[in-house]
Image: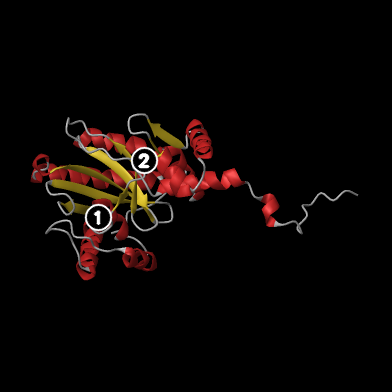
Amino acid sequence: MENTFPNTEKSEENYKVPNLEKGIAVLEYLSLRPRGESLQSIKSAIDISQTTAYRILNTLVRLEYLIYNEDTKRYRLSMKILNLGFRSLNEHNLLETVIPRLSALRDKVKETACFGVLGDEKGLFIEQAQGHYAFRFILSPGKPFELHCSAPGKAIMAYLPDTVRDRYLSYMKFVRYNSRTITEREEYLEELEKVRKLGYALDNEEELSGVICIGAPIFNYTGYPCGAIWISGPKDRLPKEVMRYSIENVKDTAAMISLDLGYSKIKK
């Protein structure tokens, strides 16, 4: 009888697909560069020929895993590759749930509304509903954000299990952006306790002077903080009355998304 099983004695080299490995290397390289890179930069970094780089990049663009900007001549990751990551985490319905709620939040507060998750060491911006004002904040998918001074970073960190939170704390360098930035671990932990009590987090000009962000956590059906939503706007458009209104809407929207994901209640 003919043997239908692979010959396990064959060298591992026989099962390698070099161009597939190079394509994955390109994706990994670009995952660390949210602004994208040029063909020449990618070719040099991956150490492949220009012809091979061109073929791989154009194949990934054709399959919609990369986006090519004609003006800057740069390639960057698309939302499609981010969606694959969500599916691997069993969160494939997360974006479908978040996007309409994000748009509704934007329509209520008029400011840009955003959604992000935790990355390997920092937060990772995923999607936004752009604000209605002429001057508004626009981010690129995949852009990292700091955990110690951002509203979404604080919102997620406040509700993480201690062991997971401590791992992220070990990565944090507490970079000072201005006099309002929290730069000490103990002060940061106190801030997270405040977030847990209030149910929302603020970036009160802690990274960019004149810019305020309001964020709240999103919980999945297990009660794990799988992401956060937030709004960003200039300080002069967010006086106290508008802040109160915006905070309630951000919290309510995060609660609705969490309920949509199967979470039965919002932790206090």
Q: How many marks?
A: 2
Position of residue 119 measured from the top left corner of the image (x, y, whole percent): 38, 54
Position of residue 43 measured from the top left corner of the image (x, y, whole percent): 46, 43
Q: Is residue 73 left or right of residue 197?
A: right
C-alpha gap between disc 2 and disc 1: 18 Å
The front one of 106 and 69 is 69
Image height check: is 61 above or below 143? above
Q: Is residue 42 left or right of residue 192?
A: right
Image height check: is 187 above or below 80? below
Q: Which residue is mark 2?
A: 98
Residue at figure coordinates x 26%, y 46% from the top left: 230
Query: Badge 2: few (under 14), some or many (20 or more) residues near its Cα, within 10 Å?
Result: many
Residue at figure coordinates x 19%, y 64% from the top left: 183
Which residue type carries mark 2?
Answer: Val
Residue 74 circle label: none
Query: Badge 1: few (under 14), some or many (20 or more) residues near its Cα, within 10 Å?
Result: many
Position of residue 225 measured from the top left corner of the image (x, y, whole percent): 36, 55
Which residue type carries mark 1?
Answer: Gly
Q: Is residue 129 visible?
A: yes
